[in-house]
Amino acid sequence: MNEAVPPKTPDAVEPKTLVEGAYQRLRRDIIEGVHAPGEKLRVEHLKDRYEVGAGTLREALLLLVTDALVIAQGQRGFRVSPISIEDFEDITRTRLLLETEALRQSLQLGGEDWEAAIVAAFHRLSRAEQKLGDNDSLAAEEWERRNRAFHEALIAASPSRWIRHFQHILYQQSERYRRLSLFSHPIPRDIHAEHQALFNASLARDTTRATSILTEHVLRTLDAVKLLPEEFFAGKRKS
Amino acid sequence: MNEAVPPKTPDAVEPKTLVEGAYQRLRRDIIEGVHAPGEKLRVEHLKDRYEVGAGTLREALLLLVTDALVIAQGQRGFRVSPISIEDFEDITRTRLLLETEALRQSLQLGGEDWEAAIVAAFHRLSRAEQKLGDNDSLAAEEWERRNRAFHEALIAASPSRWIRHFQHILYQQSERYRRLSLFSHPIPRDIHAEHQALFNASLARDTTRATSILTEHVLRTLDAVKLLPEEFFAGKRKS
DNA sequence: TCTTCTATAAATCTCGAGAAAAAACCTTGA
DNA sequence: TCAAGGTTTTTTCTCGAGATTTATAGAAGA
């Protein structure tokens, strides 16, 4: 009935083509830091690692430009987007600007299906949080996935495809930084309690409280990353 | 000093490569409606028109996915993004959310260079507005360029690269619709007066007034497009 | 020692052809 | 007339090799 203009960003979608497959694996590797921020991405090297032809890999890299995870410079190849504290601050504040607005709309417009969806997403997230803490990277990965699902479910009832599209990109960006913040836990947090409060306020349709909890929640991660030593952001230029 | 993470979107940049050249020409053709919304973009056809190889054209199309002017469906090729009134409403409101925030920041942080830049941009825009009206498509094109330059100059002092990046995408999207609104002039506007007021309020650092004028200004175009007959948005599915 | 120029090496960009998939077409049967 | 199945045509996807450009290393000169 209503065709989407913003391109949908496939997540756990089965890749229909070699380009998409390489794109998904490359994206995961960049977010997980296998390819460090600022690192040069040489097609001739990577085509072996991802087992595709040179042209195919170039197309996958071009797709990553859409997510702003890779930057392309004409005649000078591709690079992993660099990271910095300033950038994360920008990402966080822009994301809040969009996500709080989307949340407001969701709380106002969300119907029964939306409610059921966030109840389910919150439940799944809670379960993942219980299994966390044993330094289990597999559990952490599952938590990351469900955390994203929870946040996206909260704003799913917003009618703005564009806000959701940009929010998706920014959330993806912030994943790279969140991974860093796991290296040290300078700020003790009860993340489950934060999510619980956000969940309660949302179901109660308390817009003011929900948005302020969300803001606190997201800014807390920003603070944690700010405390990291600057060496984490020393983007390598070569190789 | 501060590496950018959001990819810069080249404008009148000299293309360093065949891909970039085809990308720029394709983008212009889509915005100008040479390729209609929803239209299928067949590589074999287009490679002749733009005088590049098939692989090269595919890469150019992939770059347009970043601008959300083209959507790619695995194993089913490329399409011009469809348009609709709902989409333009979404674009406009999301753009206002970002652009008013950026304007607030600019008015607070902009220095002498920023002031000089908007004075210059406003002057150039005013000149272009004088030459307008004779149904001169060349003058209209120049006006479009300077209008964009003026709006971007206003928010140039915002420190948020991400807001500016998203604003750039949304502005580009809205160009397709603004072109439609030229077909009929249902609402009489004194666009120069609107720009003049926006310019004055900005120089006076009157945040409240500037943002409200900007909002009115942008919404007025939305209203104009809303009055167009629905046939304009009948996105063709074939060819 | 440092700069500048040159030669070598490496990487990117570009193209066309073959393989795979999707769409269009036609035939057959009810 | 319509639907289903199968065949042909079209289009997309994929790859590797050649042409350009950039980066690197070495030599010459001050």
Image (cartoon, coloured by chain):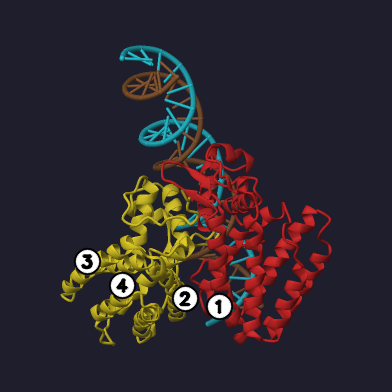
Chain colours: A yellow, B red, C cyan, D brown
Residue in front for this viewpoint, B56 or B67 = B67
**Residue shown at the point (35%, 56%) measured from the top left:** A24
For disc 2, the marked residue is A97
B130 vs A105, left or right, is right
Indicate the secondary structure of the residue bearing disc 2.
Answer: helix
Query: As shown in the figure, which amino acid type bears the numbered disc 4?
Result: Leu
- Mark 4 belongs to chain: A
- What x and y, as percent, mark residue A153? 33, 65
The quadrant of the picture occupied by the C terminus of chain A is: bottom left
- Mark 3 belongs to chain: A
Q: Are marks 3 and 2 on the same chain?
A: yes
Disc 3 residue crowd, few under 14, some 14–19, many 20+, Cα 10 Å: some
Residue in front for this viewpoint, A207 or A44 = A207
Instruction: Tell me the mark number nearer the camera, choosing from 4 and 2.
Output: 4
Q: Which mark is residue A124?
A: 3
Query: As shown in the figure, which amino acid type bears the numbered disc 2?
Result: Leu
Residue A130's quadrant in the figure? bottom left
Q: Earlier in the sequence, mark 3 or mark 2?
A: 2
For disc 1, the marked residue is B101
Q: Are marks 4 and 2 on the same chain?
A: yes
Indicate the secondary structure of the residue bearing disc 4.
Answer: helix
Q: Distance between the Cα atoms at labels 1 and 4?
A: 29 Å
For disc 4, the marked residue is A203
Indicate the secondary structure of the residue bearing disc 1.
Answer: helix
Residue in front for this viewpoint, B215 or A133 = B215
Q: Which mark is residue B61?
A: none
- What x and y, as percent, mark residue A51? 33, 49
- Mark 1 belongs to chain: B
- What x and y, as percent, mark residue A179? 31, 74
**Residue shown at the point (78%, 74%) measured from the top left:** B123
Asked if residue A79 can be seen in this view, the reply is no
Asked if residue A1 can be seen in this view, the reply is yes
